[in-house]
Structure formats: structure tokens, C-alpha cells
Amino acid sequence: MKKLTVLSGAGISAESGISTFRDAGGLWEGHDIMEVASPQGWDQNPSLVLDFYNKRRKELLKVSPNSAHIDLVGLEQQFKVDIVTQNVDDLHERAGSTSVLHLHGELLKVRSINDPEHIVEWKKELNLGDLCPNRSQLRPHIVWFGEMVPMLEPAIKIVEKADIVLVIGTSLQVYPAASLISYASQSAEIFYIDPHPFISHELKIRKHTVINAVATEGMKQLRESHLK
């Protein structure tokens, strides 16, 4: 069975109603990114950061996977599918995907500020005073700007072994995630679904097929015309 690796980003979740900070009127408007998604922002105003992610968590719990998520699950009948996502939502898992690696953390989890290995499921509000067993404050289990991306190496290994790479819902402009395509084998088939595709250098030097469409429509085209 061929190995298909999916690199997914905000575009696939946007069709479920998840706001993205790159969109006009998006979720991050009114906030400097560094205020709510950096260690410095956390040190300066943890209440603001917690409120920001509490609102995102509440939004996530109101939405559902869309047909693009469902179609990715359907590909597991034909391929060994691994999803490497930049998204912090759980829509891939709720749709039924069985192998999902989150590069940037998970919104429905929190961790101790002093023990990064202490990670727990969390679907309610997170507030100052919510502590782990060693009495340290809990924080969102999110990779903030300026922090290391601990799942990058496992993601690279997944991409390296892929026979097919599907890029969906990501601009391929934010590093280090955008660099993952450079680890794909020269023999790997690459499909890129995006309504406004950005052809990066890493993509230019590899044979690839662009499907110029939003995620839901692009997945239909992929399954009907390319991966029969």
C-alpha cells in the first residue's frame, strides 16, 4: 500500500468556520500576534493570552469537520495516510483520520509551564490559578512564535517516506512548516490544493500538480480525477 502524506493548514479548517489570522477580519485582528502567541506576550499579560485561547477553544467546540476532512479519511481505504497539520484544531481526528501529527500543538490540550511533558486534555476555560500537580500554572499546548517546534523531526521522517504528498489549505510560506516539502523524495507525486497557490522554490524544483480550488472542492477533484 502506497504511503500518502498530507500537509494541511488553516485553509481546510476555514471551511468549517474556523477563523484564520491571515484572513481580513480574521481571528487575530485587534491583537498584535506577539501579544497573544509568544512567550513574551505570555510573560507580559497571561490573562489576555488565556482569554484569546479560551475564545478559540469555544469556537472550535461549535464547529464540525467538513467534506475535505471526510474525504481524507476515505483515502485510508487506498493508502497508508499520515496527516501532518499546522492546525491546532481536532477536526481531522473528529472526522476519523487515524494518524495525525500536530506541528503547532493542540487547542484542546494544556501543559505545565515548568514540565512540558505534563500535557492534559482540556475543553473548558483555562484560567490563572489552574495548576498542574506540581503547582505550576497550566498554559495552552500551542507552539508560539519564537518557540521550538518539537514535532518537526518526526514530521520530516514521515514526509521522507511518502510516495505521494498532498498539500492542502496551507500557503507554503510559513517556516519551518513550509520547508517540509523539501524533504519529499524526487520520485514522490505531489498534489497542491489551494485557491491561490503560492509556488515556493521547494515546489518549483519538483514535479507537482496544482488543483486550483478550495479544500472541499479540491478534494473532490483529487479523488475523482487523480487518485482513482
Image (tube, rainbow, N blue to C red):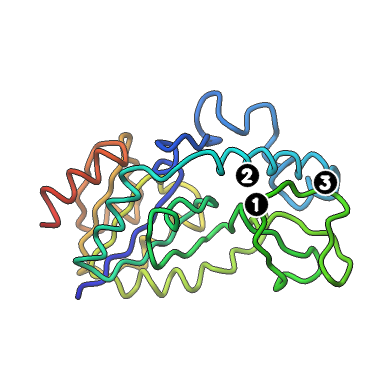
Mark 1: secondary structure: loop
Q: Earlier in the sequence, mark 2 or mark 3?
A: 3
Q: In which quarter of the image is residue 211?
A: top left
Residue 57: mark: 2
Mark 3 touching mark 1, by CB under 8 A?
A: no
In the rendering, at what x and y percent does residue 147 appear? 67, 59
Label 3 sits on what residue type?
Pro
Identify the residue under disc 3.
46
Label 1 sits on what residue type?
Lys
Q: Which residue is drawn at the image coordinates 23% and 70% (left, top)?
A: 163
Mark 2 touching mark 1, by CB under 8 A?
A: yes
Q: Which of marks 3 and 1 is in front?
A: 1
Q: Which residue is drawn at the image coordinates 10% and 57% (left, top)?
A: 228
Q: Which of marks 3 and 1 is nearer the N terminus?
A: 3
In the rendering, at what x and y percent does residue 84 appear? 42, 61
Q: Can you say which quadrant of the picture contains the N terminus?
A: bottom left
Q: Which of marks 2 and 1 is nearer the N terminus?
A: 2
Q: Which residue is drawn at the image coordinates 14% and 57% (left, top)?
A: 227
Q: Nearer the viewer, mark 2 or mark 1?
A: 1
Q: Which of marks 2 and 3 is in front?
A: 2
**Horizontal side of residue 13 vs 218, given as left or right:** right
In the rendering, at what x and y percent does residue 210 appear? 22, 45
Mark 3: secondary structure: helix
Q: Is 199 rendered above or below residue 25?
A: below
Is residue 49 visible in the rendered image? The answer is yes
Label 2 sits on what residue type?
Arg
Q: Which of 77 and 47 lies nearest the eye of the viewer? A: 77
Tell me the distance, in whole angstroms, between the alpha carbons under discs 3 and 1.
19 Å
Tell me the distance, in whole angstroms, between the alpha carbons under discs 2 and 3.
16 Å
Identify the residue under disc 1.
123
Is residue 145 visible in the rendered image? The answer is no
